[in-house]
């Protein structure tokens, strides 16, 4: 049999075995951890192929095989937690995608660079993470997107280090914002599932929620937050469970594979206004790793894996007139004040 014939036979066998999807590559060895979860394959994603993705909001999502998982972390960088996330991922040689908030990157440029230098993919998540993104004027939303990219790019020292991926704060999409992002050749990333890690639940609950939802979907794009202590606490055991349950990690990268080496850091942390969010645990708050095994094991055992609808983010049914909104902008209200105004329900 000729070499070509052998190749054809092997390819057909692969198609049969893997159902037409690319076979998972064997994970590269992980120094110091022979049992590491690792990355099973690298997937190139372009905004042209995936203008909008994630089954939480869109019909289309990444073409993942059975039990493949893409990890995404939103809202950082915030050093005490983002750094722990990096350590935990590094221990397992796992790569993820981080959707950074512009003002957090501006305040913590070194942390942003650590994420990049660890080999992770970086997208953006707006400048100020305004949680009424679906109700701010278009021009304001566009500024949030542009300023966020500029801030994270400046923190890294090279905007080319960014992937053309954007996640809308709170997933509060509008057709106008989606169209704007598409026109800018930015892929809109929703998610396939999440773990409720922004809610006031325990780290054990975050763990069981993440696993239950991934089991139900047999993988997918998982939304987590690297600014949440409960997420950091559950992460070691979460990765161990993924390994045990035969999930595999896919690392998503932009099409410009050449990752620029970052220039020497010149950006100092910029002063940012003290805002209520995100809250950083004080020195007195226990922050021990790994997560308490007994509590987590109990939660895992108690988890009956009932069928569950992945909830969409709530849309508050209040109205804020354009006039009021214009006045708020003219008076240079902060995003927090906007939110309060909106919650009070000014008409
Ligand atoms: Zn967010």
Image (cartoon, rainbow, N blue to C red):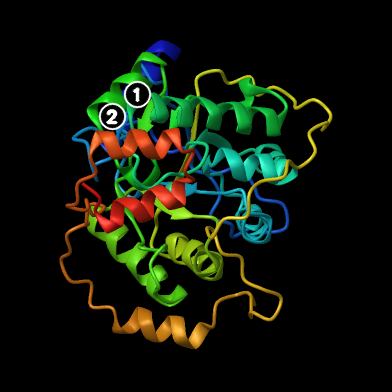
Height in image: 116 above or below 339? above
Q: Position of residue 74 (x, y in %)?
A: 48, 48
Residue 62: quadrant of the picture: top left
Please tell me which residue lies in front, 5 or 310: 310
Q: Please indicate whether residue 187 sits to the left or right of residue 74 in the image.
A: left
Image coords of residue 141 (percent x, y):
39, 30
Mark 2 and 1 residues: CB-CB less than 8 Å, in contact?
yes
Q: In which quadrant of the rendered view does residue 185 lie?
A: top left
| Residue at x-position 28% and y-position 29% | 15
Q: Quadrant of the N terminus?
A: top left
Q: Residue at x 68, y 28 (%)?
A: 154
Q: How many other residues sit within 10 Å of disc 2, few (<14), some (14-19) or many (≥20)? A: some
Say left or right for 220 vs 89. Answer: left
Residue picked out by circle 1: 11
For the residues marked 2 and 1, what is the alpha-carbon distance in whole angstroms?
6 Å
Q: Is residue 157 left or right of residue 226?
A: right
Whether residue 248 is visible, yes or no, is: no
Residue 279 in the image, given as x and y percentages of width and height: 56, 64
Instruction: Tell me: residue 318, above or below residue 179.
Output: below
| Label 1 residue SS | helix
Q: Secondary structure at mark 2?
A: helix
Numbered circles on residues, count: 2
Q: Quadrant of residue 208?
A: bottom left
Q: Nearer the viewer, residue 60 or 129?
A: 129
Residue at point 15% right, 66% down?
Answer: 307
Residue annotated with mark 2:
15
Q: Position of residue 316 (x, y in %)?
A: 22, 53
Using the image, determine if residue 58 lies above or below residue 157: below
């Amino acid at each position: 049999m000729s070499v070509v014939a052998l190749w054809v036979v092997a390819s057909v066998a692969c198609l049969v075995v893997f159902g037409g999807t690319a076979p998972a590559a064997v994970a590269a060895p992980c120094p110091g951890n022979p049992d590491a979860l690792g990355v099973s394959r690298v997937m190139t994603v372009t905004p042209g192929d995936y203008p909008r993705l994630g089954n939480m909001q869109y019909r289309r999502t990444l073409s993942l095989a059975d039990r493949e998982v893409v990890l995404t972390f939103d809202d950082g960088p915030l050093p005490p937690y983002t750094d722990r996330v990096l350590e935990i991922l590094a221990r397992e040689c796992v790569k993820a995608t981080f959707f950074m908030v512009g003002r957090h990157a501006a305040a913590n440029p070194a942390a942003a660079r650590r994420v990049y230098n660890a080999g992770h993919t970086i997208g953006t998540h707006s400048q100020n993470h305004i949680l009424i993104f679906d109700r701010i004027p278009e021009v304001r939303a566009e500024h949030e997107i542009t300023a966020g990219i500029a801030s994270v790019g400046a923190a890294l020292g090279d905007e080319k280090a960014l992937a053309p991926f954007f996640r809308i704060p709170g997933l509060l999409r509008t057709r106008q914002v989606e169209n704007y992002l598409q026109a800018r050749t930015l892929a809109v990333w929703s998610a396939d599932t999440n773990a409720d890690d922004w809610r006031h639940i325990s780290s054990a609950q975050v763990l069981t929620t993440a696993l239950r939802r991934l089991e139900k979907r047999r993988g997918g794009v998982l939304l987590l937050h690297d600014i949440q202590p409960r997420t950091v606490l559950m992460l070691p055991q979460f990765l161990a469970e993924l390994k045990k349950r035969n999930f595999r990690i896919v690392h998503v990268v932009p099409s410009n594979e050449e990752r620029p080496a970052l220039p020497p850091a010149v950006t100092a942390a910029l002063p940012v206004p003290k805002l209520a969010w995100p809250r950083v645990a004080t020195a007195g708050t226990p922050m021990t790793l790994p997560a308490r095994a007994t509590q987590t094991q109990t939660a895992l055992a108690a988890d009956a894996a009932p069928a569950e609808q992945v909830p969409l983010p709530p849309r508050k049914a209040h109205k804020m007139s354009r006039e009021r909104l214009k006045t708020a902008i003219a008076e240079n209200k902060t995003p927090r004040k906007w939110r309060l105004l909106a919650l009070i329900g000014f008409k």
